[in-house]
Image (cartoon, rainbow, N blue to C red):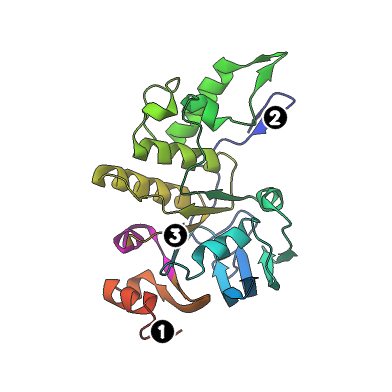
């Protein structure tokens, strides 16, 4: 943690965080970090979510899959505070919580990396990592400290970007995705939601992003991964939850399922708990 009297910035690291199966508050694998019960959400006459129950544990990656309009995005936007559920409860580390907006969720250490990444192309890497929480020394930006801390953030997650003063627009898709993940990880999240992080990436960049997800998970973070690349699930996920027409139709431990099983569940065939 670094601070200048105005901003406190948590820098992600590989030490001091409980490994997979334990949380930073003494939770065990049997204690969910966040639990959803009976979550419902409608938009007009359309029922986007129809009573969803879901648990996410410390230090695990949960794959959330389903066809378009299955309810994946609506569910994660409720977890991240973007949408307010019409019914149901959210419990985080044993305490019922109500989010009236994304700021409430972030106050509970829930971060989301959106598919569009929300990066500023014409700002450099350092500026994107510290956007909205810049460090200052008197009336001036403390560019030297921000550069040093940006390098620490990226090094802690083994992200290799040689020139941090270069514009983000000049970077590859995989590098941009890594910056978005590093920015979210620097807030010390307990829950990190990733929406299609490997879409439109080259093979080598997909491998790098998947390795990064595993490193984030190893730091005790609960990761929720939305992806249509089903093969990626078997590289990083511990469990998979399948959504179909607003309901959670199945959960699978990663070792007890395969691509064929998941495809059948996603299209609504053979759905079973």
Question: Closer to us: mark 2 or mark 1?
Answer: 1
Judging by the rendered image, the residue that carries numbered circle 2 is 7
State left or right for residue 184 relative to residue 136. Answer: left
Q: Residue sitting at 46 percent across and 48 percent down?
A: 216
State left or right for residue 90 relative to residue 244. Answer: right
Label 3 Cα neighbours within 10 Å, binned few <14 / some 14-19 / many ≥20 = many
Q: Is residue 14 visible?
A: no
Question: Image height check: is 23 above or below 165?
Answer: below
CA–CA distance in space, label 3 to label 1: 19 Å
State left or right for residue 220 relative to residue 177. Answer: right
Magenta span contains residue 115: no
State left or right for residue 252 relative to residue 31. Answer: left
x, y (%) of residue 102? 67, 51
x, y (%) of residue 127? 54, 26
Magenta span contains residue 239: yes
Task: Depth check: give the residue in front, 148 or 63.
Answer: 63
Question: Of marks 2 and 3, which one's residue comes earlier in the chain?
Answer: 2
Question: Image height check: is 240 above or below 15?
Answer: below
Judging by the rendered image, the residue that carries numbered circle 3 is 226
Judging by the rendered image, the residue that carries numbered circle 1 is 271
Question: Mark 3: which secondary structure?
Answer: strand
Task: Depth check: give the residue in front, 226 or 210.
Answer: 226
Q: Is residue 213 visible?
A: yes
Is the stretch drawn in magenta largely helix, strand or loop? helix
Magenta segment: 230-240
Question: Of marks 3 and 1, which one's residue comes earlier in the chain?
Answer: 3
Question: Mark 1: which secondary structure?
Answer: loop
Question: Image height check: is 103 above or below 100?
Answer: above
């Amino acid at each position: 943690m670094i601070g200048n009297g105005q901003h406190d910035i948590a820098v992600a690291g590989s030490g001091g965080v409980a490994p997979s199966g334990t949380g930073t508050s003494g939770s065990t694998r049997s204690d969910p970090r966040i639990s959803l019960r009976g979550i419902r959400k409608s938009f007009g006459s359309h029922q986007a979510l129809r009573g969803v129950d879901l648990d996410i544990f410390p230090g695990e990656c949960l794959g959330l899959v389903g066809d378009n309009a299955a309810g994946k995005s609506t569910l994660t936007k409720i977890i991240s505070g973007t949408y307010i559920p019409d019914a149901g409860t959210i419990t985080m580390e044993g305490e019922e919580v109500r989010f009236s907006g994304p700021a409430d969720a972030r106050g509970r250490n829930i971060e989301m990396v959106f598919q569009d990444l929300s990066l500023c192309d014409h700002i450099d890497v350092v500026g994107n990592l510290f956007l909205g929480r810049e460090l200052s020394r008197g009336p001036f930006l403390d560019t030297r400290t921000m550069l040093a801390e940006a390098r620490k953030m990226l090094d802690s997650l083994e992200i290799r970007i040689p020139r941090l003063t270069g514009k983000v627009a000049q970077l590859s898709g995989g590098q941009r995705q890594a910056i978005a993940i590093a920015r979210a990880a620097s807030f010390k999240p307990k829950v990190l939601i990733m929406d299609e992080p490997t879409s439109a990436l080259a093979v080598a960049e997909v491998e790098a992003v998947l390795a990064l997800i595993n490193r984030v998970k190893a730091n005790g973070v609960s990761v929720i991964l939305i992806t249509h690349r089903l093969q990626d699930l078997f590289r990083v996920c511990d469990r998979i939850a399948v959504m179909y027409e607003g309901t959670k139709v199945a959960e699978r431990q990663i070792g007890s399922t395969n691509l064929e099983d998941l495809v059948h569940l996603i299209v609504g065939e053979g759905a079973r708990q």
